[in-house]
Image: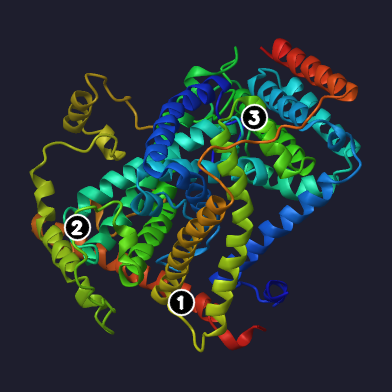
Amino acid sequence: MHIPDGYLSPSTCAVMAAGATPFWLIALRRLRALLNARLVPMLSLFSAFSFVIMMFNLPLPGGTTGHAVGMGIGAIVLGPWASILAISVALLIQALFFGDGGITCYGANCFNMAIVGSLGAYWIYRMLAARSDLTAPRRIAAAALAGYLAINISALCAAIEFGIQPALFHDETGAPLYAPYPLSIAVPAMLIGHLAFAGLAEAVISGGVVAYLQRANPALLRTSAPNAAIGTFAETEPRSGSVWAALRPLWIGLALMMILTPLGLLAAGSAWGEWGVEDFKNPDVREQMTVASHGIAPPAEPPRGLEKLASLWTAPFPDYAPTFLKSAQLGYILSAMMGVGLIIVLCLLIGWIFRLFARGENDPLGSPS
Amino acid sequence: MSCACLRGSGRKRAPFIERTVAGLLEVIEQSATADTLARADGLLQKLDPRVKILGTLLLIVAATASRFLWIVAAIFFIAVALAIFSKVPLRLLASRVWLGVLLFTGVIALPSVVLTPGKTAATLPLVHLAVTQQGLRSAAFLISRAETAATLALLLVLCTPWPHVLRALRVLRVPVVFVTILGMAHRYVFLLLRLAGDLLEARRARDIGPMNGAMRRRVATASAGVLLEKSLALSGDVFSAMQSRGFTGEVFLLDDFSLRAADWWALAAFALIGGSALWMGH
């Protein structure tokens, strides 16, 4: 997420810094009016806190660990404007002192993480938490989701900045001068990592700190919920053995989806690009391919590479139609059940492997103190 | 030092608390190294911080803006020469910048050698993927720029005491309030780093059994929550202390730097090199 120097052109960096400047000025003006003399110590301490929190190694679901930016918790506890300034200062210390994030890209990094992240997290949190009590479990979920979505929006901004570089800045031979990947690669590449890992870290820290503050100091949640009642805190200890029960709505939804899979049979034609070798020899399918490709006829012969690779693996249930079943609908449902079953087994296996590794880590007597 | 003990436990994978504490300690160690180097009797250390900031920034912009690889390479070698004359160990630059940037940017740049369309330079055996000249050039640009800029940035910080960097930021017209916040934040970063380390170690000392994932997350987020409460409480104490000394919200910084002949020569050299690189690289 921290863009280093050299990834963005100087003109992009200048535009991003110019885009960030009004937000910094507005934030400074608003906070000066609100805090007056308290501004300097409060922002200094919160910037220092933001810096330290970025260094926390957070245990994530699935056994891995990750680092968060703290944009969610900053926006919730201090409000978006103070969070913008505090995270900007933390990013400057990181860039200048620890080389994390480029100096020329400082404006872009602040725009993505401090500005878009803080404003996004704040509005998502307020929208999701609505008028619930300060100690309502809903606020924990809202904070976690706000952190998760905010960091993904920030990542999307960074991906767009990367993705426009090759089109705008290349030499006479066509070689990209900065980030080399177009939007079609940059956006999925950035988002996959953030949806899967970085987003989880942000969700854990945002939801976790809100849960802690609800127990310890709910008044600190007042900035982003000025009219909410304190409420009564309900201890939400997870009941042992209730993991499967807690996921009941998910299982019901999954079962419903499996039952509805035969709906795919209603769709006419074949999915674009999912053609097999045989389809290139079938005149009817060839016509469908031409129509689906806006009048461009497919090649007369199947592509050689496709022909070669198609014989490498034969699916046990080709086209979701097991050979031993005559009903297409039942074939779809059985395929869905098999697919879901395999994924669950795979997840359990991965979880078991992670637990096996984690067991070694958690032996408190095994290390000197 | 307790943190050093944790590091030296010899275990293959440290638990999350120990990894976090080790990371916090590393920051403090890096800061101590920077303090020591900033006091060394080297070329950059002798220069006025304003000259160093402007010069370094000019060279970073020149390296970033150049459309020619040889110019980026030339600036990189100038940075290495500056490091040698400033008594900054190249091993330190290699471990803190060159290797990390090469690994991080290298992984990002590597697919571009086959994904960038262009003239085929070679074909990879087994996978039969074409490596393009444009892809190689693009990867070389990305890695060399990132290495050069990161080297220059680290040199600036290693050869300049942090308070001087802050005061010199004023020449870039950074608002005085922002500079003051930056200075105070930097000071309190180290206090909070130690506080976070103590918190986590105290928590770890009370562990009597293995923790599952949910418990570990609760420990980490509760520690972050405690740190947040302490930070905000401390900001109140600091404000009271500042107020008792007459602080009313107006910030003044002493700007007692003065340029000597050597600083003017250095400024001219930076301007000549940076300006030439910008002009030729455009």
Identity, as a three-letter code, of the amino acid under mark 2: Ala
N-term-proximal mark, 1 vs 2: 2
In the image, taking residue A301 as reference, residue A283 lies left or right, namely: left
Please name the residue that numbered disc 1 is placed on: A355
Label 2 residue SS? loop
Label 3 residue SS? helix
Please name the residue that numbered disc 2 is placed on: A228
Identity, as a three-letter code, of the amino acid under mark 3: Arg
Identity, as a three-letter code, of the amino acid under mark 1: Arg
Query: Is residue A26 in sight in this rendering?
Result: yes
Q: Which mark is residue A18?
A: none
What x and y, as percent, mark residue B281? 70, 14
What x and y, as percent, mark residue A179? 54, 30
Please name the residue that numbered disc 3 is placed on: B170
In the image, taking residue A320 as reference, residue A240 lies left or right, namely: right
The answer to whether tags 1 and 2 share a subunit is yes
Name the image quarter holding residue A323: bottom left
How many numbered markers are drawn? 3
Residue at (45, 25) in percent of width and height: A164
Name the image quarter holding residue A170: top right
Disc 3 to disc 2, C-alpha distance: 43 Å
Disc 1 to disc 2, C-alpha distance: 41 Å
Circle 1: is it few (<14), some (14-19), or many (20+) Cα within 10 Å?
some
What x and y, as percent, mark residue A327? 8, 58
Picture quarter with the N terminus of chain B? bottom right
Q: Chain of mark 2?
A: A
In the image, taking residue A346 as reference, residue B55 lies left or right, namely: right
Picture quarter with the C terminus of chain B? top right
Q: Chain of mark 1?
A: A
Of circles 3 and 1, which is in front?
Answer: 3
Q: As displayed, is residue B213 above or below residue A335?
A: below
